[in-house]
Image (cartoon, coloured by chain):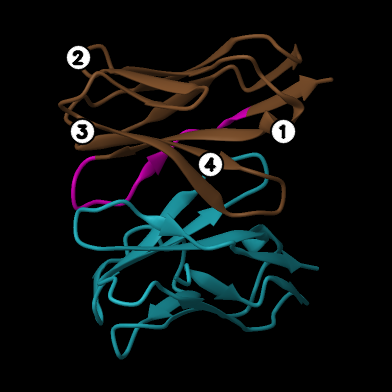
């Protein structure tokens, strides 16, 4: 079956632009996670959804970061007024409750 | 707060060698521990998942051990091959929480 998909795979933005990153989880997976992976680092947690409810957004680095999952399936991570320090790979993972997380290929964001 | 450390940060070995990657974590109250592989520009591929009640898991040439009380896990790779070259990440799950990752070990297997 299809795994977790993310789009776009690569995004180049000028500093100050807004970007939107999409995650399509595995069908039926109620849990959805967003992680940020800077170059040479391990992924770091950003936010977590269970169905459409955002249960934890403690990892979002600033109020420029916003995530939503309005129908409990597809999720979008939006970054407003991008800065150079936002350059990273953004990974999405989905799972059944308390089960293994399955990761997408990530979106590599480069802010110039 | 859970912290995960991986040693070494990078490792280069000749083909055929057996090798060990190390992972340590500060809070032993974990639900499971997982080892991932990440190829350049790619997402994460799960290699092995060890439940907190287990001591080890094996898959092919890979063996992962877990000593929860001492906060340590090792990933053993037997008879390494150039295709094993990748970054290996250790992640801890404390149950209904996001995974906490180490920074990874970048492995190069030289033919």
Q: Position of residue B31 (x, y in %)?
A: 19, 37
Label for residue B30? 3
Q: Mark 2: few, some, or many residues within 10 Å (few <14, many ≥20)? A: few
What residue is disc 2 on? B69
Q: Position of residue B68 (x, y in %)?
A: 22, 19
Residue B103 visible within the image: no
Q: Secondary structure at mark 2?
A: loop
Q: Quadrant of the N terminus of chain A?
A: bottom left
Q: Position of residue B7 (x, y in %)?
A: 54, 17
Give left or right: position of B30 versus B22.
Answer: left
Are callouts 1 and 4 both on one chain? no
Which residue is depicted at the point 43% across and 20% down?
A: B63
Question: Drawn colour of chain B?
Answer: brown
Q: Which residues are magenta?
A: B94-105
Looking at the image, is mark 1 or mark 4 nearer the viewer? 1
Q: Mark 1: few, some, or many residues within 10 Å (few <14, many ≥20)? A: few
- Chain whose colour in the figure is cyan: A
State the CA–CA distance, disc 3 to disc 2. Answer: 10 Å
- Tell me the quarter of the picture where residue B84 sits: top right
State the CA–CA distance, disc 4 to disc 3. Answer: 19 Å
What residue is disc 4 on? A42
What residue is disc 1 on? B83
């Amino acid at each position: 079956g299809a795994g977790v998909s993310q789009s776009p795979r690569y995004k180049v933005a000028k500093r100050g632009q807004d970007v939107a990153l999409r995650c399509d989880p595995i069908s039926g997976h109620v849990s959805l996670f967003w992680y940020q992976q800077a170059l040479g680092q391990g992924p770091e947690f950003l936010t977590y959804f269970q169905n459409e409810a955002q249960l934890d957004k403690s990892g979002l680095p600033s109020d420029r970061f916003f995530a939503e999952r309005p129908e409990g399936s597809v999720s979008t991570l939006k970054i407003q007024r991008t800065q150079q320090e936002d350059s990273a790979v953004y990974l999405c993972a989905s799972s059944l409750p308390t089960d293994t997380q399955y990761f997408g290929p990530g979106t590599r964001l480069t802010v110039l | 707060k859970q912290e995960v450390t991986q040693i070494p940060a990078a490792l280069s070995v000749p083909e055929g060698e057996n090798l060990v990657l190390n992972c340590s974590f500060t809070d032993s109250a974990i639900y499971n521990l997982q080892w991932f592989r990440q190829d350049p520009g790619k997402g994460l591929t799960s290699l092995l998942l060890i439940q907190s009640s287990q001591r080890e898991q094996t898959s092919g040439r890979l063996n992962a051990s877990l000593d929860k009380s001492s906060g340590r896990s090792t990933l053993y790779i037997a008879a390494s091959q150039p295709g094993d070259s990748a970054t290996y990440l250790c992640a801890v799950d404390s149950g209904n929480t996001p995974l906490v990752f180490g920074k990874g070990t970048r492995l190069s297997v030289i033919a």
